[in-house]
Image (cartoon, rainbow, N blue to C red):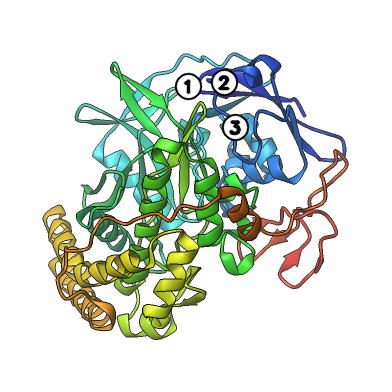
Amino acid sequence: MMALDVYIEGHHAGQMTRSASDTVVFTYLAAYAASGERTPLSLSMPKRTAEHAGVVPQRWIENLLPENEDARVAIASKFDVRATDAYSLLHHIGLDVAGAVQFVPEGQPIERPGELIPWSDKHIAAEIDRLHANPADVDLDSEIGRWSLAGQHGKFALSRVGERWVEPTGTQPSTHIFKVGMNHREHSDVAEFVTMRAAKIMGLSVPGVDLLNFDGRLVVAVERYDRTTSEDAVVRLHQEDFCQALGIGSAQKYESDGGPSMRAVEALLRANVSPAQRERSIAEFARLQAFNMVVANTDAHGKNGSLLMRGPQVRLAPAYDLISAALVWSPKSVWFKGKMAMKFGGDYRLRRLDARTTAKAADDLGVDPEGYSAAVSDFASRVGPALDEALGAAAVAGVDPAVVESLRSRAQEWGERVDGVCGAAQPGAAAELAVVRRRASARLATAMPPARKPETKTERVCNAYIARTRSRCVLPEGHPGSPSKGHRSGR
């Protein structure tokens, strides 16, 4: 298959190829790699090494695409191809992916003429209906299939121009992601909106989020933090999620599956974030983990956290994909049975939240234990009122009053529970969180998994289809436990 030219922030950065043995290779252009002002494709593929081959580039591009295999099949069908792997699909949908990277078939121009196609409320409502009916569906009559949004759930991207919603074509970027919620969990879209708004109320950095109504259909619209407006033009900002930065595949996004831990992410931040932003990013990540714990955001895995990069500068991205399990399930069940995506103080279980686990979490996160204990207590006392305030915004947006009251009852029950366990005597009085000073290199050595053997160009990935996650295995071919229960032959 034809090679892919890789552009970052509009600059030709390198080329991606796939060998006869199916090894994906990314090679930086010499001039791009030599420039200190150019942004790397990934922290897992630094510019100091010209060529990166094997599972790391393979995993990185797989993380750009939907994890849902049905969604990949739908995209492949749109372009009349059979292959559903990332390398093949990026030949067709590589123009508007996450971050500032763009992929085009070798030799093709990156600048392509396009237009902004207006979408009416009726059109958007139809798209919402289609994705509710089948989250993996792709509109075969629209260019909407030309972009890639990672994840498992139904979503689509549009741009906001004045008071209109438009579909960008050519190489023009989208500005908002529309999320329709999980079909198997009623009102999960409202729960996500409420959780995101509560995070903002409590002082966390989150993108703008609205709950919009199109012909009676509600949808969550999230501003893309990897897009900004400059002189009336939309500009792409480069980003990657924690899994990509650590060279981990999407099938291993949960810590229990070998994915990132809080300790590993803190080490990643300490080693790579720019000095001027380092302490702020570490403290913000620690505060986010406190919020995740007290709000029961049980799906805060390694793909639901990212870094923003520009040249040599790196910082923590705003928080996204926040959703309180206590608004979706019974608060009592969530407390006694709920487990976090990353261990908090050495334990996944929510009900283990106490002074001991908080102190251990502070050590993992590289922050002052006393200050972190105060921050967790403060958040525990404030989360209930914050959820209640956010539910008020949901009511204004047009959510059925009965739904609002049902969620308000859950929010109150949950807030009272966590406040009773570890709430602060004086909410809002917690001091600024102090970051502990220590060496980043030693931190990385203990936080990261054992180093793999050096990759070679002949290394192949397993590529078996995993029905449980609806994704393909990106571990090396013949990895321990392969073939194992849950694998079946690729298709």
Image position of 324 with respect to 415: above or below: above
- Where residue 214 sits: x, y (%)? 23, 46
Secondary structure beneath label 2: loop
Q: Is residue 418 left or right of residue 77?
A: left
Amino acid under disc 1: Thr
x then y, percent, for residue 85: 69, 44
Q: Are marks 3 and 1 in contact (CB under 8 Å)?
A: no
Judge depth for marks 1 and 2 and give the one in front: 2
Q: Between marks 1 and 2, how big is the CA–CA gap?
A: 26 Å
Q: Residue at x 32, y 44 (%)?
A: 222
Give me the disc on residue 255.
Answer: none
Residue drawn at 72 percent across, 53 percent down: 474
- Residue 387 position in % (x across, y down): 20, 65
- Which residue lies at the image location 22% right of the left edge and 71% below the top edge? 407
Can I make out residue 163 in this image?
Answer: yes
Q: Amino acid at mark 2?
A: Gly
Q: Who is closer to the viewer here, 397 or 377?
A: 377
**Mark 1 residue element:** loop
Give how far apart the Cα atoms at labels 3 and 1 are: 19 Å
The quarter in which the N terminus is drawn is top right
Q: Which residue is tagged 2?
A: 36
Q: Earlier in the sequence, mark 2 or mark 3?
A: 2
What is the count of numbered marks? 3
Please name the residue that numbered disc 1 is placed on. 171
Which residue in the structure is indicated by mark 3?
Answer: 41
